[in-house]
């Protein structure tokens, strides 16, 4: 049997197992292990062992539990609530101001947590009821929360980019810095769209009543200080790293400790908050480690088969496709998979194939990590089975129907497609900051 056929059988078996509801790491790891033992006998057992040792020796992986812990401390201690109160007062006089503030809230939540699910939960529980109560158009605000929450996997510290870094063997710090400008650019594009749309049709985002936004300057400044606490925590963590004073792991420890101390100072570090944060950190960290281990084992078998070279030969030599055409086809496949898989599953399924292929085609792997992440964000929100669509349906009040949710997301998807095209056309949007910091 040819190596190409073995690779096809491995890939199709893995997809079949996922369709039957098996856990991601179990499906990928099992196929990789069985293929290794079948092809190389007992010597194949060295592959998962080598992957486990590689995982344990990967020092930047320590950032994963640190950032997850920081995010849960900030969300469980309700510090995120202070952010929304700040936006409520400061942005209330503007048409669409609370929706614009929600995008700002999502950016800061992303910088606290790095998971889109956390942004969705905070947006749906804190922002959505307030927006609906104040007469905002339900379709628009539903789209705002879905689009804003998707920034969690791009704005650093992104947990998904940590996973990509491990599989693609790229520096986490460079990937995080590469996500800064694209993430902020998309957030600004969302804000401009909301502002223009509410300017044209003020009924979509009415200003708050005078009595709700009346506050003295001292009260506004007090809210500003409370709301900007997460910004201070993020700055305390990232500025020393960007300046070169601390390593990535040291910066993650600074962020976790600063968040912990902030919760204590504000009197919100209860036993329950601490216990929930530790339990969730342990659960999510272990889940990601199992997935990375399975993906590394599966990828090692793929490398051993030479499947990547065979596929590159098929596309470029036999079919005569341009590298850019191949790249676009890869991005389209992410959109298709996003209808039934989350970002982690998509990455570990295709990374053993796509990442080496991108390298062979001559593209930058850090830049491609940003493209993958944005495409995943789009796939999250693309009907009929976008991941974020069903999260919103589960969290939204009854008056918001699935039809509303589907209809709300189209403008934001188009904005993200434009952003993706801009970053593909001008790679320096993503690469300038990591080149500047690491080139010093």
Image: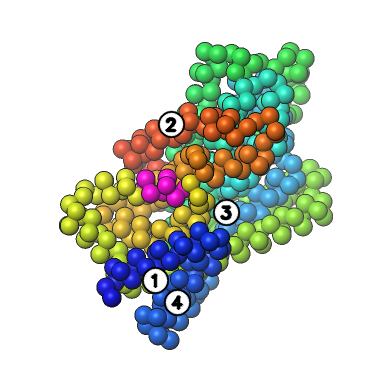
Residue 332: in magenta span: yes
Q: Position of residue 50 (x, y in %)?
A: 45, 77
| x and y percentages locating residue 315 in the rendered image | 23, 55
Pointer 2: what residue? 414
The image shows residue 229 at horizontal and vertical percentages of 68, 39
Q: Is residue 125 above or below residue 157?
A: above
**Mark 3 or mark 4: whose residue is earlier in sequence:** 4
Q: Secondary structure at mark 2?
A: helix
Marks 2 & 4, CB-CB < 8 Å contact: no
Residue on which the image places disc 3: 251
Neighbor class of circle 3 (other Cα within 10 Å; few <14, some 14-19, many 20+) is many
Whole-angstrom CA distance, mark 3 to mark 4, is: 40 Å
Q: Residue at x 53, y 71 (%)?
A: 56
The stretch of residues the image draws in magenta is 331-338
**Point 70% across, 37% down: residue:** 125
- Could you tell which of marks 2 and 1 lies nearer the N-terminus? 1
Tags 3 and 2 in contact by the CB under 8 Å rule? no
Is there any visible trace of residue 146 in the rendered image?
Answer: yes
Asked if the stretch drawn in magenta spans residue 210, the answer is no
């Amino acid at each position: 049997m040819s190596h190409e056929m073995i690779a096809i059988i491995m890939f199709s078996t893995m997809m079949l197992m996922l369709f039957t509801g098996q856990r991601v790491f179990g499906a990928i790891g099992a196929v990789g292990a069985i293929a290794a033992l079948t092809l190389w006998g007992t010597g194949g057992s060295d592959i998962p062992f080598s992957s486990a040792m590689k995982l344990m020796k990967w020092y930047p992986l320590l950032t994963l539990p640190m950032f997850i812990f920081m995010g849960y401390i900030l969300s469980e201690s309700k510090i995120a609530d202070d952010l929304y109160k700040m936006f409520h007062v400061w942005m209330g006089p503007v048409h669409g101001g609370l929706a614009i503030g929600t995008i700002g809230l999502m950016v800061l939540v992303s910088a606290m947590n790095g998971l889109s699910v956390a942004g969705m939960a905070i947006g749906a529980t804190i922002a959505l009821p307030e927006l609906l109560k104040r007469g905002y158009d339900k379709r628009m605000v539903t789209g705002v929360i879905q689009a804003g929450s998707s920034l969690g996997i791009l704005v650093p510290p992104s947990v998904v980019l940590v996973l990509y870094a491990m599989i693609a063997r790229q520096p986490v710090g460079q990937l995080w810095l590469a996500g800064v400008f694209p993430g902020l650019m998309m957030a600004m594009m969302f804000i401009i769209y909301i502002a223009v749309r509410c300017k044209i049709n003020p009924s979509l985002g009415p200003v708050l009543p005078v009595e709700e936004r009346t506050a003295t300057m001292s009260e506004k400044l007090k809210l500003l200080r409370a709301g900007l606490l997460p910004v201070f925590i993020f700055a305390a963590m990232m500025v020393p790293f960007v300046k070169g004073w601390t390593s990535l792991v040291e910066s993650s420890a600074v962020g976790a400790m600063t968040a912990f101390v902030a919760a204590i100072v504000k009197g919100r570090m209860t036993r329950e908050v601490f216990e929930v944060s530790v339990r969730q950190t342990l659960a999510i960290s272990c889940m990601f480690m199992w997935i990375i281990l399975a993906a590394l084992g599966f990828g090692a078998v793929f490398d051993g088969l030479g499947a990547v070279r065979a596929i590159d030969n098929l596309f470029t030599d036999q079919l005569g496709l341009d590298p850019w055409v191949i790249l676009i086809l890869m991005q389209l496949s992410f959109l298709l998979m996003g209808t039934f898989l989350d970002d982690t599953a998509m990455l570990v399924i295709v990374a053993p194939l796509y990442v080496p292929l991108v390298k062979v085609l001559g593209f930058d792997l850090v830049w491609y990590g940003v493209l993958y992440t944005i495409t995943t964000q789009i796939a999250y929100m693309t009907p009929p089975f976008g991941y974020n669509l069903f999260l919103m349906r589960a969290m939204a009040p009854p008056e918001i129907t699935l039809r509303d949710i589907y209809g709300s997301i189209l403008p934001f998807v188009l904005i993200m497609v434009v952003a993706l095209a801009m970053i593909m056309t001008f790679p320096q949007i993503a690469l300038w900051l990591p080149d500047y910091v690491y080139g010093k």
